[in-house]
Image (cartoon, grey):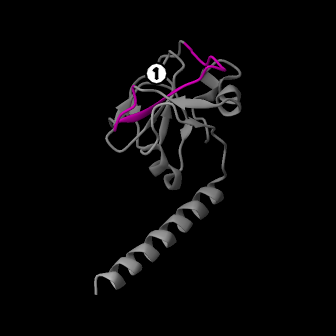
Amino acid sequence: HAAPHAALLPKDTIVNFINHSWHVSPNSNRMGTRLLSDECDISHDVSLPSMAVAPGCIQLPPNGEPIVLLNDAQTTGGYPLLGTVIEADLRHFAQLKPGDFLHFKFVTLNEAHEAREKLTAHLNQLAIALNYINK
């Protein structure tokens, strides 16, 4: 499900999250890309028990400033999840700088698989090219 905890959050949280732009917080690091918005407030008072999380999970702390978990993130968390950044796009979050702007959009499972296949094909082409250069 795109937003596993949507029913627990205030009514328009997911719509506001998708329909507004976000910028990268200076407090971002290798654990997570923290996001800020001047356009919307998605703060909440939902409390959840800790659950498993993985890179790509979009956590929503009570302050309404989402965190996209990256490769060095913790393995459990207790914030509601807004969704997951697809594998093919996650590498871009590690390269964002404070102040960079972004928008989110929903994709289907098929679109996520196609994006991963396209990325895999591109990486395979790079590996072949590097192998050719190193001969």
Point out the residue furthest to the bottom here. 135
The residue that mark 1 highlights is 48
Q: Kindly identify the amino acid type of the residue bearing the numbered disc 1.
A: Leu
Front residue of this view, candidates 88 and 13: 88
Image quarter in which the C terminus is found: bottom left
101 in the magenta segment = no
Find numbered disc 1 in the image and state the secondary structure of the residue it sits on. Answer: loop
Front residue of this view, candidates 123 and 49: 123
Point out the residue furthest to the top here. 45
Residue drawn at x 46%, y 76% is: 125
Residue 116 drawn above or below residue 2 = below
Residue 41 drawn above or below residue 31 = above
32 in the magenta segment = yes
> Label 1: few (<14), some or many (≥20) within 10 Å?
few
What residue span does the magenta drawing correspond to? 27-44
Image quarter in which the N terminus is found: top right
Is 29 situated left or right of 48 in this image? left
Residue drawn at x 64%, y 29% is: 17
